[in-house]
Amino acid sequence: MSRLRVEYEPRLVEEAVLRAAAGRPEEAEFRQSRDRLYELEDPDQREAAFLALHGQWFERLGLCGPVEEALGERPLLVAQVRRCAVVRARNKKEEGAELFVSPDPGLGRALGLQLRPESFLAPAPLLGLLRHELLHIADMLEPDFGYEPELRIPEDGMARRLVQERYRVLWDTAIDGRLTREGRAPTRVRQRRLLDFARAFPMLGPEHFAPFFDGDHPSHPALLACARDPVQALGLSGVADRRCPLCRFPSYSFEPDPGRLAPALVARIQARFPAWQPAQGLCRQCADLYRGHAVGAA
Ligand SMILES: [Zn+2]
Ligand SMILES: [Zn+2]
C-alpha cells in the first residue's frame, strides 16, 4: 500500500480490540499482557504501554484490514492526501469519510474516517461502507466532478432539504453504479438505489435512473441541476403535458418501448380499450397494472 499515514484514535483501537478479542482463543494471552501493564507505576509509561499493546493487537487481529484494503483500491485519492485520521463514531449515522482541506497549502488535505468500534468486528460490511465513502471523497478530488462544499442554491427551509436529499440520492446512485461495475458493490444494491430514486423522484421512471447508475462520469453541477428541477434538467418539459391514453393522467414516465409489449398484454389492454394501439404509448403505471393478472378479472 501507499505511504499514507493512517492514525487511529487510541480509544477506538482499544475498544475495537477489547470487543474483537472477546471469545477468541488468544483472549487469555491478551488479557494477561494487558493486566501486567497495570503494575507499571509511572502513569505516562503505563499509558504508552497500553497504546502500544492495543496497537499490536489491532494489527494481530486483522482489524486494520478493511481500511487498508479500501485505501489500497484508490491510489489516486491516497496520492492526494497527506494523512488519514480514523476516529470513533458515536453512532451508525456518524460513520463516514470527510475531506479536510487546510487553508495552509503546505499542510495539504487530510482524510477523516469516523467509524464505530463494533464495525471492525464485521469486516465485509465495513469494507462496503469504506468503498462507498471513499468514492465520495475521490469524486470531491476529481476536478471534472466540479465539487463544491456548499450547495449554492436559492432554496431554503423544506425546499432546501428536499434538494439536498435528492442530491444525496443521485450521488449515491452514481457511486454504487460504478462500484457495481468494479465488482465492489454489495449484491442487490441497484434495486435498493432504484427504490431510493423512485421515492425521491416520483415524477421520474426507471429509465431516468439508469443513466445515473450506469454513468461513469457524474458531475456535481449535473447532479445538482437534476436535484433542483428534474423535469427541466432531463429535458422532459414537453412530456409533462403528455397524457396517458389509458388512464388520462399526465405522466413523465411512459413505457419506454410500447412497440415491444407482449402480444398477450396488448390483447388484455385492447379488451378494455379497443381503439388503442401500442404506438400511442401508455404510462408505466398502466403498463404495470395490465401486466398484473388482477386486471383481467376486474
Ligand atoms: Zn453516500
Ligand atoms: Zn396510464
Image (tube, rainbow, N blue to C red):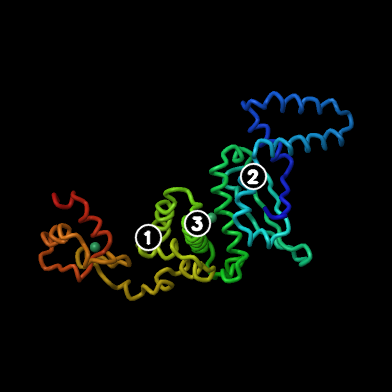
Q: Nearer the viewer, residue 55 or 12?
A: 55
| Residue at x-position 80% and y-position 25% | 36
Residue denoted by label 3: 182
Disc 3 residue crowd, few under 14, some 14–19, many 20+, Cα 10 Å: few
Q: Secondary structure at mark 2?
A: loop
Q: Amino acid at mark 3?
A: Glu
* Pointer 3 or 2: first along the chain: 2
In the image, residue 254 above or below residue 90? below
Q: Amino acid at mark 1?
A: Pro
Residue denoted by label 2: 89
How far is disc 3 from disc 2 in space, using C-alphas? 28 Å
Residue denoted by label 1: 202
How far is disc 3 from disc 1 in space, using C-alphas? 29 Å
| Residue at x-position 50% and y-position 62% | 167
In the image, residue 273 above or below residue 32? below
Discs 3/1, front: 3
Discs 1/2, front: 2
